[in-house]
Image (cartoon, rainbow, N blue to C red):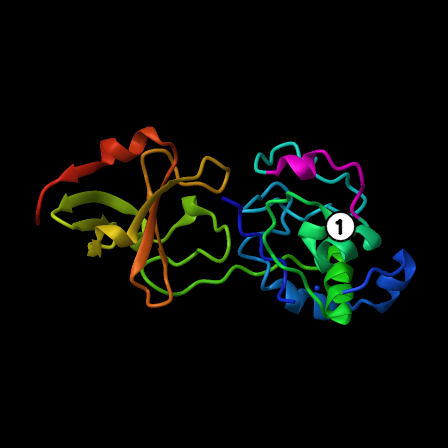
Amino acid sequence: MKHLFVLVSTFGLSISHSAVWAAGDAARGAAFFQQCAACHSTTAGEHLTGPSLANVWERKAGTVADFHRYSDALKRATFVWNAKTLDKWLTDPEAFIPGTSMTFPGLRDSNARQDVIAYIKAISEGKAPTLAQRGGGMMMNMQTAHADLKAAPAEGQVTAIKHCADTYTVSTADGKNNKVWEFNLRFKTDSSRLGPTPGKPVIVGAGMQGDRASVVFAAPGEISRFIKEGCL
């Protein structure tokens, strides 16, 4: 299955390196990039579905050492990321690198494309702010940004999980028992520096209706040990 790497909403024609940079506006590009933030961080070393885009400018494609989800096609690439190659990539990733795991169809608006490129360049030069994390929703909603789970508030700190029939009851440090249909609760792991403290999983809300959630553990072995059968 291909990963969904969303890099803006609709990408056109390749133009020269200097023309691309001259035409782009980093501030407008930052606004467009909000659509990419669910899959790409701008913080160095913080990888989501896709790799961090910090320091991407003039970096050889497919070479971030601690990112392990590159497609074979991108790992075989020999180019570096600059205005020209980013313009081709954002126009149509699959046409530029056949076999890429980036399923985003491309941004056809040339002006918007140049703005995004300008923003990416500004990030690498330290001239653009990283995107703010956003929250809100069921329990602790951090699905649109890779928040620091070690700093989760009481409502996100899981103290117990019980499974009864088709329902999980997730107890949290604020004293609440959150009942979630088993089909709407996912169990995940995050071993990064932003992941939860070992033995202290965190519940993260998701879903348009606020009816879904994920419990994030520090390691796979914690999951089965933490879940107990029983009804409240």
Which residue has dot 1 on it?
Answer: 124
Up/down of 10 relative to 100, above or below: below
Q: Main secondary structure of the magenta part?
A: loop
Number of on-image labels? 1
Residue 9 percent location from the top left of the image: 62, 66
User: Compared to 68, does 122 lie above or below?
Assistant: below
For image coordinates 28% across by 50% down, the residue present is 185
Please name whichever residue, 23 or 14, is drawn nearer the observer in this view of the structure. 14
Residues in magenta? 70-81
Confirm whether the magenta stretch covers residue 80: yes
Q: Position of residue 45 (x, y in %)?
A: 61, 40
Q: Nearer the viewer, residue 11 or 45?
A: 11
* Residue for point 47% across, 47% down: 148
Residue 121 shows up from this direction? no
Q: Residues within 10 Å of mark 1 (few under 14, many from 20)?
A: some
Estimate the x, y position of residue 12 in percent, counting from the top left. Answer: 76, 65
| Residue 60 visible in the picture | yes
Report if residue 76 lies within the magenta region: yes
> Which residue shows up at 57% across the image and 34% down it?
68
Residue 224 figure quarter:
top left
Q: Position of residue 59 (x, y in %)?
A: 77, 41
Image point (49%, 62%), residue name: 134
Q: Is residue 5 left or right of residue 228?
A: right
Residues 149 and 222: in front is 222
The amino acid type found where label 1 is placed reads Ser
Quick one: which residue is furthest to the top in this view? 221
**Left or right: where 171 falls relative to 55:** left
